[in-house]
């Protein structure tokens, strides 16, 4: 007896529509993966980093920034990076329902449940998919790491911790004050 497994395609996945409330769906190698909604520290970092990057990108007219949107990485892969950036020259990849190619930058903010995915699986997938820059932000450890795709592998371009001020490609003229990214302690 033989079993046949049919993988879902990116176009089939996009036909599903919006995710159910409180759940985030992605397509990985033709199979649907679920993850819970982010915790407050995660959401706070994304909001703050979007503010910092948006001001800089808009002022210099560098391109467009998007949070949490379906991004096609292959026939059987659709991810939703926390933040993505497309340079002005590559805005043709911004589709009606999803991003239709690799962003210039993907940012993933680590949650307790996503450490292995963000640091290993997405790290490899984004490199294979041609994402030029990848940032990993860890709100619990209060760290940021930047990577640049050299050939087919990522090489670290910079990092910071706690209250450091960092500059990371592709925005290597922008000072990012990490102290602004972290959720203040409860009073």
Image (tube, rainbow, N blue to C red):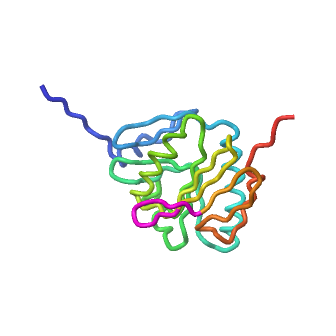
- Residue 125 in percent (x, y) is at 42, 51
Q: Is residue 125 above or below residue 24?
A: below
Could you tell whether 51 is left or right of 38 in the image? right
Camera-nearest residue between 155 and 59: 155
Overall secondary structure of the magenta section: strand
- Residue found farthest to the top: 1
Residue drawn 45% across the image and 42% down it: 26
Looking at the rendering, which quadrant does residue 93 occupy?
A: bottom left
Q: How many marks?
A: 0
- Residue 46 in percent (x, y) is at 66, 49
Q: Is residue 166 above or below residue 62?
A: above
- Residue 164 in percent (x, y) is at 74, 57
Residue drawn 42% across the image and 59% down it: 100
Q: Which residues are magenta?
A: 148-157
The reply to whether the magenta stretch includes residue 152 is yes
Camera-nearest residue between 19 and 173: 173
The reply to whether the magenta stretch includes residue 33 is no
Residue drawn 41% across the image and 42% down it: 27
Q: Is residue 33 above or below residue 105?
A: above
Could you tell whether 31 is left or right of 92 in the image? left
Camera-nearest residue between 83 and 180: 180
Quarter placement of the N terminus: top left
Camera-nearest residue between 121 and 61: 121
Quarter placement of the C terminus: top right
Residue drawn 58% across the image and 33% down it: 22
- Residue found farthest to the left: 1
């Amino acid at each position: 007896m033989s079993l046949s497994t049919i993988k879902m395609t990116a176009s089939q996945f996009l036909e599903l529509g919006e995710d159910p409330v409180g759940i985030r769906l992605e397509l990985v190698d033709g199979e649907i993966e679920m993850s819970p909604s982010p915790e407050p520290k995660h959401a706070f970092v994304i909001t703050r980093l979007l503010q910092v990057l948006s001001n800089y990108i808009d002022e210099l007219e560098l391109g467009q920034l998007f949070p949490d949107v379906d991004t096609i990485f292959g026939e059987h892969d659709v991810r939703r990076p926390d933040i993505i950036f497309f340079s002005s020259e590559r805005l043709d990849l911004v589709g009606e329902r999803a991003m239709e190619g690799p962003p210039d930058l993907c940012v993933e903010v680590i949650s307790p449940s996503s450490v292995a995915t963000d640091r290993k699986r997405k790290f490899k997938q984004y490199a294979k998919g041609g994402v030029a820059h990848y940032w990993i932000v860890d709100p619990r450890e209060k760290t940021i790491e930047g990577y640049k795709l050299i050939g087919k592998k990522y090489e670290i371009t910079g990092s910071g911790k706690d209250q450091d001020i960092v500059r990371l490609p592709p925005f290597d003229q922008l000072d990012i004050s990490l102290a602004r990214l972290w959720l203040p302690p409860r009073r």
